[in-house]
Image (spheres, rainbow, N blue to C red):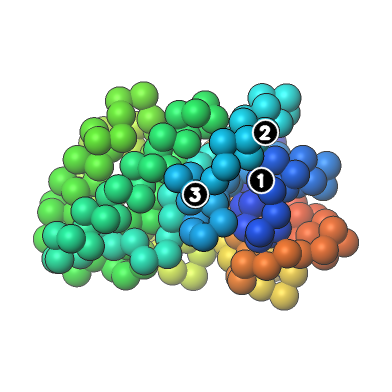
Amino acid sequence: MPDSMRVLCSTEFLWGAELSETVMLLSKLGCEGFIISTEPPHYLPSMMHKSSMLSLKSVLSSIDAVVVVRSPETDINLFSSNPYISEASIRSIEEAGKLAKILNADFMIIRPSSKPFNGNPMIAVRKLQVLASKIGRDHYMAFELLGEGSVNIADNLLDPRLGIIYVYGMSPHDLINHRKLVGISMYITEGKPPRKVIPGLKGETPYLIIYPSRRHLYDTKELKRIIIGAKSWRDSLI
């Protein structure tokens, strides 16, 4: 398990800092990849200065690590019945897709909605597939799916570019052994991940993704403890 599951760290652990500086520090502290935040107000690509984006691209090109761009989570509801909300969500995700292309990211992570989808799962599948076609044929995407309908949605994602992320404590347990599983994500509380094994987790799951439970500027010692804790949890899965 440890040989295949790489620890990816969100840049939101250093909320408000320059992304290039954040990536360098996370790399020095042992992160094996980076989840590049596009959350407003600091990191929405259209609000970032061009020099910041170029600096980030330069730093990433000098580091051998997995690069993932995560579309905004705040105020996103791709599944909204209100077409204006849905369309605004698509625009925000497309903007993140452009950044992923600029950075030559390995893939994107998208949370379509902060609420579970309650309707016909095929409607959700169609929306996700249309979104994928809008962003481009060369992009790989992994969706953070919440709620019990998530398994049916995942079952019907036929496009080989589309995968899923199991969100610890938020996704239904059956999603943990799904054929399209790309990784598991955890929101770290009290400085460390859970100590127990997740039953059903596949040995070949490639990524463990860690986010802060709240966005703020962690100090280096605290962040190092979090990363060591995440690796220790991963290593306990042998």
Tag 3 near tag 1, CB within 8 Å: no
Task: Say which quarter of the image contains residue 170.
Answer: bottom left
Quarter of image, res 230: bottom right
Name the amino acid type tagged 1.
Leu
Residue at x-position 24% and y-position 46%: 128
Question: Where is 56 relative to 207, above or below?
Answer: above
Looking at the rendered structure, the secondary structure element under dot 3 is helix
Residue under pointer 3: 47
Using the numbered discs, state the Cα–Cα distance from disc 1 to disc 2 in whole angstroms.
Answer: 8 Å
Q: Mark 2 points at which residue?
A: 55
Q: Name the residue at 19% across, 69% down.
A: 118
Say which residue label 1 marks: 19
Q: Is residue 1 left or right of residue 203?
A: right
What's the distance in space between the residues labelled 3 and 1, CA to CA? 13 Å
Estimate how packed mark 3 is, as few (under 14), some (14 to 19) or many (20 or more) residues with alpha carbons within 10 Å: few
> In this picture, is 155 found above or below 76?
above
- Which one is closest to the eye, mark 3 or mark 1? 3
- Secondary structure under tag 1 reads helix
